[in-house]
Amino acid sequence: MEPVLVVDGIEKSFGGLKVTDKVSFSMFPGDLTAIIGPNGAGKTTLFNILTGHLAPDAGSIRFEGKEIAGARTQDIVTMGMGRAFQITSIFPEETVLDNVRVACLSKLREATVFIRPISAHKRATDRAYQILESLGLEKFSDRRAFELSHGDQKLLDIGIALALEPKLLLLDEPTSGMSPEERLLTRELIKKLWSLFNLTLLFIEHDMDMVFGIALKVLVLQQGALLVEGTPEEIRSNPEVITAYLGEEL
Amino acid sequence: MGVILEATGLNTYYGRSHILFDVNLDVRAGETVCLMGRNGAGKTTTFRSLMGLTLPREGRVMFRDRDCTRLPPYRKARLGMGLVPEDRRVFGPFTVRENLEMGRIPGRKGPWDLDTVFHQFPVLERMVHRLGGTLSGGEQQMLAIARALMGNPDVLMLDEPSEGLSPVIVVRLKELILSLKEHKTTILLSEQNIRFAMAVSDRVVVIDKGHVVYKGAIEEFRREESIQKRYLAV
Amino acid sequence: MESNKRGWTTQWAGIAVLALFALLPLVKTSDYQLTVANNVLLWAVFAMSFNMLFGVTGMLSFGQALYFGFGAYSVGLFAYYQGTWWFLPALFLGMAGSGILALLIGPLVLRLTGVYFTMLTLAFAQLGWGIVVKWYDFTNGDDGIQGIMPPAALSNKVVYYYFCLVLVSVSVWFLWRISRSPFGLMLRCIRQNPSRVRFLGRRVKRNQLRIYVISAVFTALAGGLMAGVDNSVHTGMWYWTTSGEVILMSILGGMGQFFGPFVGAAIMILIEDMVGARTEFWSMVIGIVMLTMVILLPKGVVGELVQLKERLFKRSSALGV
Amino acid sequence: MDPSFLVIQGISGLTMAMILFLVASGLTLLFGVVNVFNFAHGSFYMLGAYFAYTFVSILGFNFWVSLLLAGVAAGAFGMLMEMLFLRRIYGRAEEAGFQILLTYSFILIIDDLVKMVWGTEYKSLQRPDGFSGSVELLGMVLPSYNLAIIVLGLLVAVGSWLVLSRTRGGRIARATAIDREMLSTLGVNVPLTLSLTFGIATALGGVAGALAAPLRSVTPGAGIEVIIDSLIVVVLGGMGNFWGALLGSLIIGEVTAFAVAFVPDWASLFSFLVMIVVLIFKPEGLFSPAKVRRA
Amino acid sequence: QEKVIKIGAIYPMTGRAGLYGMDSVAAMEMAMEEINAKGGVAGYKLDALSTDSKVKPDYSVRIAKRYIEEDKVHFLFGVVSSGVGLAVTEVSKQYKKIFIGTDHAATELTVDNFQPYYFRVSNNTFQSMAAGAIYLKELQAQKPWKRIAYIGPDYAYGHSQWNELRYCLDRLGVQYEVAGEHWPKLAQPDYTPFITTIMKDKPDILVSGFWGGDTVAFIKQAIPYGLLKNVLYFHPDAGGNYELMSSMGDELPDGLVLSARHHNNWPDTELNRKFVGDFFKRTGRYPSYAAEGAYAGVYAIAYAVEKVGNPDDADALVKALEGMKLKLPEDPEGFTSYMDPDTHQIVQMQAIGVTMPNADFPPAKKMLGNWKIYKAEDLLPPKEYIEMKRKK
Ligand SMILES: Nc1ncnc2c1ncn2[C@@H]1O[C@H](COP(=O)(O)OP(=O)(O)OP(=O)(O)O)[C@@H](O)[C@H]1O
Ligand SMILES: Nc1ncnc2c1ncn2[C@@H]1O[C@H](COP(=O)(O)OP(=O)(O)OP(=O)(O)O)[C@@H](O)[C@H]1O
Ligand SMILES: [Mg+2]
Ligand SMILES: [Mg+2]
């Protein structure tokens, strides 16, 4: 099977600070992989590099066989990489529906149609409602996004990413700031979407229930470098990971 | 132990949407109270109302036996209320040090200054000259807490402090809160991480759709599984 | 769907307003009223196309006078050198030329954001102004060009007014469709969160350039038609105060509302006219009126009206277009 | 080309730059640092000139005393306007736009106030005693008042930089541009800070107007004429940076000075050309604040 | 019901041109009151509307249209800026409404853009420059000079003065060398670099075409450099405006050669003294040059209506104005201003003077004196000049 993503020895420094240090790994279709690591380990930075928000100093990234290191975000996204953000990134003044709909339109390549009203774009609209429903946000569809609570905004962010039907979806701490209930829901939801759409998923999490609950593989980053890579069971019992990251259970 | 912070009958709105309904809350000196509730229950709004960032339309906020419902936030801060907002809001273009110095409130004395804060958060000391905006999510969270401590607040309000922190750091945060308790700092926090909340709190207030639906000591709350299920879905 | 209903109200309001303008020649008591109405219409198009940049996409251009002047001078120069027959072709050439100019300048100014963008647009516009003032032999410098007459078929004031009204209606309709379209939504998203738009796989700069060009084209239309109202053009049309005026109009009317700039333009022109005619201290009076509106109407005139309506109909606070 | 002419022209440019900088300094503080836009900055400059005229020519005060008083008066007036009006629009959704509109209405109102109080006749102020002549230096004639302005300009630059970067007050002022709400929860009286900054900025504008008065004619409408130049300087240097603003003024001053000498026909277009070139090559101004980017 | 002649005045009332507008309106009202007090003309009383032009041509066009269509005025009147004048004369032509120009000086209005309904009752720049050229020629005979530099605002007014002056100098056969041209923008705040450049070029004469407050700023900034001591400052169109004298007081150097379209202390005639004195009584200040133009304009209207008998027949009024002869405050003994029927430009004498101490018109401490007077006929643009311009 061809890998979707091959990351090979990428590096990134800010000033003198090495934030990503020769990271290499691959993702295969259908993977469900978690990245964990202490705060400041360089997880978000890694995502930023993968999505073209930052250019790596060295190394190569091949997405579906094409080199994308240093390519522009919008091109990478068009190729099929989607992302939701650690600090929620939505369109606060638009309605919840439109937040998702704009992504659907973009996916359907109808986002720059400029005469036909949005409501006439049935396919995008239906799809947006569908996604909102699956996230449990349909009751807010006419509300403006900024009126949602923190946790709901987080879900909306994921919804926007989902709408792009990405081949590889990156989620940066998808459940942070969510209540246990939503966490559970989101966890199930992600799992469901993953199997339903044959998604390939890479997510950053600090919630161990989530990591060990659904991930098939776990990558551990520490000080920019890949510390270990393995199945959840291997990671959970890895002494290095325990001291650097997990600590004793609360 | 006397009540240091008390809210009675808070009703708060955003524009025309009614968010808080007759919220009553009291925090006694030296204790740690945890506000729990689902997303959108109104935890953040409660903090905003207490701090005066969003003024409640009805109700009263008493702080140290003084009615300060309508006092502007800076007056409350000077009286000894400190807030760590859920979105952290560090000053991006400022260095870590400058961020911390902004937290100092002239005239307020206490155990916290740059040295003690750095002692508590060695990570921050390593990045004193970095710009706040370049910190990682978790680093920003620590900075925000440290900044609030710099003002030596009598009551520290933490809106979901463990969010985005890695498990080891959460443990450290737990220790920090316990040590703050020893320093007689009063703490009001909101949490979604139940285990963490249970580990640090003395009392729990559960809020749902803007209504306070449960109040009780932590030991009691532990046993209230139906409440936990109903409002927190654990 | 709620947002659609609101869309309809705006649409009907627009149609009603344009119908009122269409009735004016039948009820007017002097040709002067036509002149004023025409001014309102053309400045409204100018302000609305500016607002596509500012209110919608979040690009505060301080250089729209460049395209207004360009449109006006295309008509002026062609009419001056080639005769009135060229009035109409020049109008459309001016729009096309403006579009091309925007296509050239756009990529340069769009590299910048925030105030830097604002100031660079200002610099280009001022450069344009400087060249027009300096190129005396060709443009007549700051003497301007006079005696620009629309061709015979349009020379009647009422006919010319209807001609403008039709073009204005088409423009407003077009801008309205844009704002209701996916492209319009995209533009609003760009204002609120440009980096997220990139993560939708869309190019922010390219879309900004698109609307920059569209805005320039309609601005040129307004400028070109204006040449026929005043029968003269002058360098002030290129000057930064012209860009400034259109900014004020948009904010006053409400930049978050589609028809805000239209209403803002009407208010500014009518106040200027009524107060100017009555007192030498117009500046103080207009200043106080503006100040009062800013303080009392935090959403701009139209924004407040929409809110008032919503309150009356007990609707939840949500987005107006 | 006579090299001594180059020096003389360079000093001319310097003089021009310093006045430009002085006029813009208030705007740099307000717009660049605190991120409040005051379209009416020029009006306070004009008020400063008229106040100075009143103090010197009508009340017979000493020039330097009048300079200070003019600054205080303009600042007090500015602060009053801020507290009465501007304060009401802080925190609105489209605050930036309303700042433009509101301060534009200040221009209109102040213009007529000036006309009512001082009339439309041109006023003029004499240079202060001891500064009306010139000094000769290496065979060059240098007006002593111009030298005084150069020195004062440098003092303002250094002083403002010290205050902004080295004091708590300065840091607070910078923080208001970032997050006013957060700042208030840290015990800072944000409204007062903004009023004070507005007052200081308009006082700087007033002092600049008073300083420029002996070199210019004091006329109504003088306000709107300086605002664009000030904006150019603020943005050219990079928002919020006093050294940047100084450098911006210097570039505009020197480029204009040499354009006047060598390409007189096109001299008036040069400040815009400079701005275009600088912004195209340095899109965030010359001294851009460190970029902060997070996904 | 009283019959009225309605005048629609368009003047700037704010900003740096506001002074000229205010003075013009005051003088216009003064003239109307004088005429009305004597019973009006041909059974009509004079009445005027006045609107601030804001020095904006498009806005002024709107005002003019309002005057004609809503207020039904008989005459358009005023205008300080030539740009506004050119736009308004277009309206006047379209509506066949007489436009009396009182202040703006661009020669185009009576030459290139001539139209039958326009009349100007003050000198244009060509007349000032023609007088200036003769002055310079005479000066050369006494005190040989060679190098001449020019500084003037970078817009039409500044450029045409310089072109016209050179045209006139060439026509008079004066030999000279141009030592630099300088084009600061209008309302340029800072002239230092211009001053040092001029000093480098070492001209004998610096011709200035500044307008309004710019003259004040330039002179103030030039004084400490000693520029005005070494170079003759020569400013024949608007340099001798009273506001320069009044605002600069003592500071104004002696020996500058200036002129204006009207002087408060020349000619020393009954009419001028009365005009200046009445103006002072009315406003508490002495008039700037603009006032006399407006004053003359009202009298021109009265003259025409008197001749025709009503203010409605525009074509008859044009005829009357074309033959107008009018004794005005700025006419010296033995001369009467008259209208040139070909250009609709008033023909007047021009006096050029030199600054010298004179405290008769406070707050000015200096006024012009040592007058040189130039005959009106010598100042008109020659036929071939007019034809050349009109052909273009
Ligand atoms: N633009 C930048 N300039 C300097 N340092 C940076 C920049 N961006 C990130 N860093 C630093 O790089 C390190 C990695 O940051 P990153 O955001 O990737 O961490 P993270 O693993 O996502 O942490 P968290 O779990 O707390 O979100 C941090 O120490 C951060 O301070
Ligand atoms: N600015 C706003 N305008 C309108 N409604 C708002 C606004 N901010 C929050 N709300 C609404 O108020 C309610 C309470 O929100 P609040 O942020 O207090 O919840 P929370 O308990 O803090 O949730 P979370 O755990 O997700 O942070 C939510 O329903 C939310 O949609
Ligand atoms: Mg992160
Ligand atoms: Mg919250």
Image (cartoon, coloured by chain):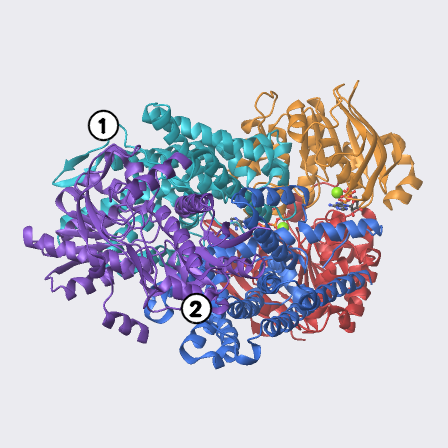
Chain colours: A red, B orange, C blue, D cyan, E purple
Pointer 2 and pointer 1 on the same chain: no
The amino acid type of the residue labelled 1 equals: Gly
Establish if D4 lies above or below D165. Answer: below
Vertical side of C301 occupied by E269: above or below = above
In the picture of the structure, the residue carrying the numbered disc 1 is D130
Quarter of the image where the N terminus of chain D is located: bottom left
Front residue of A245/C242: it is C242
Disc 2 residue type? Gln
Which residue corresponds to mark 2? Answer: C146
Task: Please give the name of the residue rendered at 25% of the width and 58% of the height, measured from the top-left corner.
Answer: E127
- Judge: label 2 CB < 8 Å from ligand 2: no
- Whether the residue carrying mark 1 lies under 8 Å from ligand 1 is answered with no
| Callouts 2 and 1 close, C-beta under 8 Å | no
Q: Quadrant of residue C162?
A: bottom right
Give the quadrant of ligand 4. Answer: top right
Say which element carries label 2. strand
E319 in relation to B25, above or below: below
On the rendered structure, is D230 left or right of A52? left
Where disc 1 sits, the SS reads loop
Q: Nearer the viewer, mark 2 or mark 1?
A: 2
- In depth, the one of E233 and B204 nearer the eye is E233
Which one is in front, C35 or C217?
C35
Residue E225 locus on image (x, y percent): 19, 41
| Residue at image coords 63%, 44% | C294
Instruction: Give how far across and how far down residue E179 sits, in percent.
Output: 15, 57
Q: Which mark is residue C309?
A: none
Q: Nearer the viewer, residue E275 or D24?
A: E275
